Amino acid sequence: MPLTTLRTLTELARSGATIVFEGLPADVPGLGNLAQRRREFRTLLDGWTFSPGPVAGVERASGNGRVWRGNVLAAVKASGTVREALADTPIDFVRRKTASGHDYFLANLQGSPYAGWVTLGVPAASATITDPLTGRSGLAALQHADANHAQIYLRLKPGESLLVSTSTRDAASAGRASLLRQGSGVQARGRPGEGGVDANWTWLEPAGAPVAIEGTWRIEFIKGGPDLPPAIITRALESWTTLGGEAAQRFAGTARYHIEFDVPARSVDGWVLDLGDVRESARVRLNGRDVATAWSLPFEVRLNDLKPGRHVLELDVTNVAANRIRDMDKRGIEWKIMRDINIVDVRYQPFNASAWPLERSGLLGPVKLVPMRRVP
């Protein structure tokens, strides 16, 4: 272990942190000033005198600070650290402490949706859920497993992520604090797809068969290079590398998809625009108005108060640069010009993308409107 690392750990322990070693480090790396660094290293380690700890398999130091060694999980539990029950669910998470409670970043990286109550490793009087893609925020349904563990209700689709902020204050105070944190980013409610703050977070589930958005799509390439391919008119959504010619195959940039569609009259609590397969991001515009940008799974946009009748949908879809890089290497265009070193591959050979397969690009769909109802 580097001497600077051991110094830092020692200072943390002296400051009140709990340091747990599975086994103490034996030496320092490198040869520079070796004897001097080894002496200081040994002095720091000798400052800890270990004796049997509070649980089997764990020893506790009686020297500088709170330092334990042995079974890490047993030591962490004995130190009073609460294990997160979230670790037993398919949800990945990161937690940090705040002045009023704790913040959680939650992500469903599995292939199936998750729904149910989850137990947090902290107590809470209230909790706020925020969608990081839209800024929509609302108070979570909350109950108490015991005095030290709050439970909240979650529904996460594959690829979906949410932010949860717990608070030791009641729901009314937490709601006001959430509004203040949103600041000028709060948008008026009742507008299709826009972010905003709900009094309570609302969960939606499909309320019937989806409505396919079908018809004639106009695809116009609006920004990128090496040049803008000709527009495409199609009824079938496929990669623009298939729908267009060579110009579309070497293009990297943004294409605008345009279609008109009808919304049927249904008794629903809202609609979700499901874009299907998107390569790689889509800015959604409805009736000439920006709604949201979908850039991660699931490629879905919530549309509030979507009225029956005729609507105009525009999607600005942007791909990655792989096809353009492939084309430049196929044509021998010199583009890898660096000041200090050129680009190499994993074998440290000159990088060349000419043999890359074409990357699928654009809106692959299928695109559909899903009627939704509130989950009780």
Image: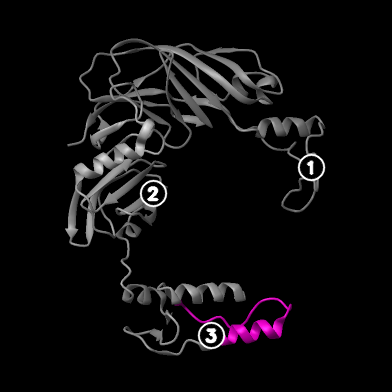
Residues shaded magenta: 20-45
Task: Specify the amino acid type for callout 2.
Answer: Phe
Q: Is residue 343 left or right of residue 103?
A: right
Residue 124 coordinates in the image, percent (x, y):
23, 54
Asked if residue 309 is among those painted magenta in the image, a careful observer would answer no
Q: Disc 3 vs disc 2: which is toward the camera?
A: 3
What residue lies at 69% left-to-right and 30% top-to-bottom?
324
Task: Specify the amino acid type for callout 3.
Answer: Leu
Residue at mark 2: 105
Quadrant of the drawing holding the N terminus: bottom right
Q: Is residue 139 visible?
A: no
Residue 196 coordinates in the image, percent (x, y):
32, 30
N-terminal of the pair, mark 1 or mark 3, is 3
What residue lies at 54% left-to-right and 32% top-to-bottom?
280
Q: Nearer the viewer, residue 186 or 333?
A: 186
Contact (Cβ within 8 Å) of mark 1 with mark 3: no
| Rendered view: 264 above or below 296 | above
Q: Nearer the viewer, residue 158 or 40?
A: 40
Which secondary structure, mark 2?
Answer: strand
N-terminal of the pair, mark 1 or mark 2, is 2
What residue lies at 21% left-to-right and 35% top-to-bottom?
375
Q: Is residue 81 left or right of residue 168?
A: right
Q: Is residue 113 visible?
A: yes
Q: Is residue 336 left or right of residue 80?
A: right
Which secondary structure, mark 3?
Answer: helix
Q: Residue 289's image quarter?
A: top left
